[in-house]
Amino acid sequence: MKSTVADYRYRVLCLRIVPTAGSPIYLTDHPRDLMINGHTYLSTSGYQFTGTTAAADFSPASVDIEGIAGASGITRSAVGSGLFDGARCYVFATSWIAPVEDQEPVTAGIFGKATLLDHRYRIGGVSLIDALGQSVGKTYGAQCPKVFCGTEYAGCGVSLAANTVTGTLTSVTSASVFRDAVRGEAADTFGAGTIRFTSGPNAGLKALEIKSFSGGTITTFEPFYYLPAVGNSYSMVRGCRKRLADCQARWNGSATFSNVANFGGFPWIPTGSTYAQVGQGS
């Protein structure tokens, strides 16, 4: 049973979307915008809740939303670049007369992949209970499974700030190939790292993974939603190929150090072709 419920006479639904990067989006189905806890929850202008389900028996809940790209702070570029993929969403009910954030929680979930339909978008999500109910197994392999610069328990432990650089583009070949002539790092320093733009048309969109880096030329696996331009500033994180050699000479600020103690791979486990061989006598 819920400890707090909204007054049924003035009950409205509100949705808070927290993307993987960028600022949260605040929405409400009330005819007018609501100011709650210092945040402006935008009214149903250009979007609608297409489905919200939740039950008391711990069965999976879901939340779906669709609307016109560009309305209510959900832009076409943000949806197209995948900014809302994996975003957290929180649905709650409150009274429009005296609104309180998260007064009556309805469901909390994680968005799946957002899709664009011409100038409309559609985003579907599952509840956190459903996400936690997924069976997850551990896979052993030569590569380290940890997130580079992760600070979780028993994580990578390498400093994120010390492995982040900033700069400005000096030339652009395409939306996935561009160059900063000032960069003097060795080849592949940023391979498997990430880059995000802090100015220009792609500012605020999600970071993309770097495919290769050589002589200041940066190539990403995916193209950015908008074509970058000379002079656009960026923030870039050094990469990690998840090999033992990467941990043996890890960059951390002004010097290199060994991070082998935190390496999570198992490079000495024999492959299936090795331990499945039939023994041979001498």
Image (cartoon, rainbow, N blue to C red):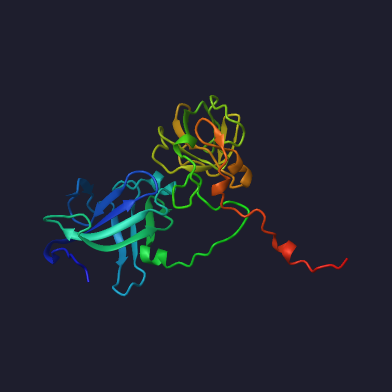
Rendered position, 33 above or below 5: above
Coordinates of residue 280 in the picture (x, y in percent): 84, 67
- Residue at 56% in and 37% down: 257
- Residue at 33% in and 72% down: 58
Coordinates of residue 210 in the picture (x, y in percent): 54, 41
Coordinates of residue 191 in the picture (x, y in percent): 58, 40
Q: How many marks?
A: 0
- Residue at 22% in and 52% down: 43
Quadrant (top left, top right, bottom left, bottom right) of the N terminus: bottom left
Q: Is 39 on the left or on the right of 173, as rendered?
A: left
Q: Is 139 on the left or on the right of 202, as rendered?
A: right
Answer with the quarter of the image where residue 108 lies.
Answer: bottom left
Quadrant (top left, top right, bottom left, bottom right) of the C terminus: bottom right
Rendered position, 193 above or below 170: below
Q: Is 142 on the left or on the right of 194, as rendered?
A: right
Rendered position, 91 above or below 189: below
Coordinates of residue 184 in the picture (x, y in percent): 57, 26
Residue situated furthest bottom in the rendering = 57
- For the residue pair 95 and 149, the one nearer the viewer reads as 149
Answer with the quarter of the image where residue 59 lies.
Answer: bottom left
- For the residue pair 120 and 22, the one nearer the viewer reads as 22
- Can residue 209 be seen at all in this image of the molecule? yes
Q: Is 7 on the left or on the right of 168, as rendered?
A: left
- For the residue pair 87 and 42, the one nearer the viewer reads as 87
